[in-house]
Every structure is written in structure tokens, then in C-alpha cells.
Image: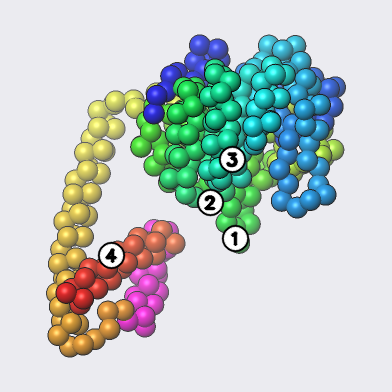
Amino acid sequence: MNLQPFLDEFIPKPYIIAGPCSAETAGQMLDAARGVAAAGASVLRAGAWKPRTKPGGFEGYGAEALPWIVDAASACGLLSCTEVATSSHVHKALDAGIDMLWIGARTTANPFAVQEIADTLAALNADVPVLVKNPVSPDIELWIGALERINAAGITKVAAVHRGFSTYGDTYYRNSPQWRVPIELHRRLPGLPLICDPSHIAGRAEIVDKVAQQALDLGFDGLMIEAHCHPAQAMSDARQQLTPAQLRDMLSALRLCRTKDSGSERLASLRAEIDNIDDRLLSLLAERMAVTDEVGRLKQREGMPVVQPERYNALMGLRSEEAAARGLDPAFVRSVLAAIHEESVRRQLDIVNR
């Protein structure tokens, strides 16, 4: 990807983007802009168009709300940012003077919609920063594809926004963070700025600070936070919005990493120790797979089925208990063992089908 420094010449790191979920009135936006600017934000965010899961809900005031966002940001020395999902949205937002655009999770999941936005930006020869939120599902290729489409349109100031993923049955978070996905995104696209939206991950104002701190501890470049002067009266996402005072207190309490790599001798020593352990793990995996291959050859000779669910379930239960006894997360250990088992089955199937 052809990337340029995101907004370093305009605003300091960590990037703090804050504002209400929805632009509701001109006065509400001005009050919010004053509040988030005083709290330490550099960019005012608000939705003009709000995608709703079902019809009948508040879907934003559309183009009417754009001047409210632009004027409030300008009055408080902030940049303005809003969500776009169609070509029409892009035209209207840029015509109104919006400084930055973001593409929401539902739109990122639709390559046709992202391409429509990209084609519009290319046709307008727009030089505007674009934030791309992760898709609803943890599909990193879909996320990267959306980023590449926008970048290919000539947009070089691109950033990724991690807002978590929809999961069935997770009641602690609104959207599960699944940090491994943005970490892998950063590994594959190290020059891409990574911003966290702790509001949509948390879903509750009382744990937004916890998620925000986790993001900064992981080296994220900024935060995108929902803040409303009167959250209880908000027309959308009332539970997860902070007041400007809460935003100020949270930002002042966050621990910022001085550098992404301190380079200390102790850190280097610990990393070398981890490298040695990883080498041993790889050797053990290779040894285990060699035994797996022998098991596959035996099953081929004896005409036995490759998968034996009873043994697998019994071992999973036993290893989960052992993991807990060793201070390991049983769910994590089960996921590791499941991946090893999947690879073992694949290798045995190759042997049996030769």
C-alpha cells in the first residue's frame, strides 16, 4: 500500500477522535465540540447517517446534520469526521467541508459498497483522510481488501479502526475485541496507523477506559471515542457514551507508552528467552507430527477411521483441567489443541488417501 503519515502534521499522537454517536442538533454538536476539545481531542466525530439493524429506528438527520458537525469543529479548532456508506454520502460530506471520513463495519463487509466509495473518491480526486473500521466478522482479508480499495483510489492517508467483532453469546463486550486480529493486521501492514474504538467494543461507558488502556498497551496509535454531553438523552448508543468530563478524566488517567520498543537490555534478554522457548515448541510440534504420521500409517494398515471423537473429547477435558492447574486459560489451551488436532487430521487424511 502507498501510505503517507496519517495526520502527524495536524494533530499529536495518540490521535484522539471524540464526539457523539449522532449529530442531533447544531447546539448539541457545539456543546460536544467544546467538551471534547477541552478534554484533549483533536478531531470531532459524529454520525450524520446511522445504519440501523431494523427499520424504524433513528437513522440520523443526513445531509442536514453535516453543517452542524463542520461548524462546531471549526469553532473549537478541531477537524471534523463523519461516516459515509454510499457515493452520495461522500459527495455531500465533502461538499459540506468534512475533513475526514470513516467507513463503518457494515460497509467494510461489503466490497461493492467500499468500491463505490473508492470510485467516488478517485473521481473527485479527493485528498481526504479515510478511516476504515473492521468488518463485523473477524475476517482480516476483508478488512485489508477494504483498505486496499481505498488506497488504490489515491487516498494515501488511510487508517484502520478496530471496533471489535460481533459474536453470539458474549455478554461482557458489545463487540468482542479479539486483539489477535488487529495485531496480525499491524504485522502485515506495519506502516498503517491503527486506531481503537473502545466505545463499540465496550458497549458500556463504565468499561471504555479499560478497553482504551488495553489498546494503548498494545501500541495503538489513537482512540475513537463516543462522547455526549447528556448520554442518557442520546438518540443512539446511549449506554456507551461518556460525558466530556468523563472523557477528560479517562484521557488524563491513561498510561501512554513512551516508545513501541524501549530497547532495554532486560527486554532483549526476555525476548531471547521467549525465542528459545519458541524454538523448543517448534521442535516438539515437529516431533508430535512425526508421531501423528506414524499413527496415520497404522490406521491405514488397520482400516481404522482417522477421527475418533470419544478420545478427542476425553483428551480435551483432561488437558483443560491440566491447563487450569498450571495457571493457563483453559479456553486458550483448547484453541491451541484444536488447531494441532486439525493439522494432525489433515496429515493423517493425506496418508490414508495416498
Is 323 inside the magenta-drawn segment?
A: yes
- Name the residue beneath numbered marker 2: 137
Q: State the image coordinates of residue 222 (x, y, percent, origin top left).
A: 53, 27
Q: Which sits earlier in the primary sequence, circle 3 or circle 1? A: 3
Q: State the image coordinates of residue 192 (x, y, percent, origin top left).
A: 43, 29
- Marks 3 and 4, how far apart at CA: 36 Å
- Name the residue beneath numbered marker 4: 343
Tell me the kind of residue under disc 2: Ser
Residue at point 58%, 32% (across, down): 117
Whether residue 340 appears in this view of the structure is yes
Q: Give the range drawn in magenta.
A: 308-330
Q: What element carries label 1?
A: loop
Tell me the kind of residue under disc 4: Glu
- Marks 4 and 1, how far apart at CA: 26 Å
- Marks 2 and 3, how far apart at CA: 16 Å
Whether residue 245 appears in this view of the structure is no
- Name the residue beneath numbered marker 1: 168
User: Which of pointers 2 and 3 indicates the residue nearer the eye?
Assistant: 3
Residue at point 84%, 27% (across, down): 25
Q: State the image coordinates of residue 331 (x, y, percent, origin top left).
A: 44, 62
- Marks 3 and 1, how far apart at CA: 25 Å
Up/down of 349 relative to 184, above or below: below
Q: Which sits earlier in the primary sequence, circle 2 or circle 3? A: 3
